[in-house]
Each structure stands twice: as structure tokens, then as C-alpha cells.
Image (cartoon, helix red, strand yellow):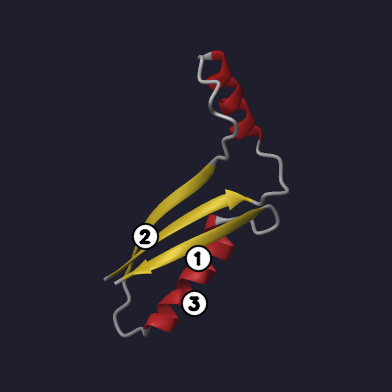
Amino acid sequence: MAQAKVIVMLKKEVSDVQGVTIQQTMQKLDHAEVAKIRVGKYFEIELNGDGLTKDQLKQKLEDICENVLSNTVVEEYQYELLD
């Protein structure tokens, strides 16, 4: 069983409306030191990798990230395949 961690974030050039709203709320709650917040998604995935090489598992993970977990038009992702 292989495990992976995936983080999906809006691309830097895309306005993060949720992040702005949270940052404004922080200001109102007297947390003026918070200058910026970006919101993303975090996934922990267990892959049944029986018989697959590490490269094949990475390719499967890439497919999952690009086709299911993210909208690559406005989001970018990074992952870590754990041993």
C-alpha cells in the first residue's frame, strides 16, 4: 500500500476570494499581523500499488491530480509519494 499527500492551490495569478475574505475577518478580529491568506485543499491518499513500480504509481497520482482533484486551468498541485 502506497501513501501520498497532495496539496492543490489556486495559481498565484488567480484571485483567491476565500483567502481574501478570511484575511479580512482576521483583521476584524484584531489579527492585523496576518497580511495574506491563500486557501487550498489537502488530500491524503492510499494507493493499492501491488505490482506497480514507483514511476507507475507517480503516473497514476499525476492522472488523479490532473483529472479529479484539481482544475488545472486555475489550480496547481504538488504531491509527495511516501514509501
Tell me the quadrant of the picture where the N terminus can be found: bottom left
Q: Amino acid at mark 3?
A: Gln
Mark 2 neighbour density, 10 Å: few (under 14) some (14–19) many (20 or more): few
Mark 1 neighbour density, 10 Å: few (under 14) some (14–19) many (20 or more): few
| Residue drawn 66% across the image and 52% down it | 11
Q: Is residue 41 left or right of residue 67?
A: left
| Residue drawn 66% across the image and 33% down it | 17
What separation in Å lies between label 2 and label 3 (alpha carbons)? 14 Å
Q: Which residue is mark 3?
A: 59
- Number of disc labels: 3
| Residue drawn 51% across the image and 20% down it | 31
Residue 13 rendering spot, x and y as whole percentages:
73, 48
- CB atoms of marks 1 and 2 within 8 Å: yes
Looking at the image, tell me whether mark 1 or mark 3 is earlier in sequence order.
3
Tell me the quadrant of the picture where the C terminus can be found: bottom left
Q: Which image quadrant is residue 73 in?
A: bottom right
**Numbered tag placed on residue 45 in the rendering:** 2
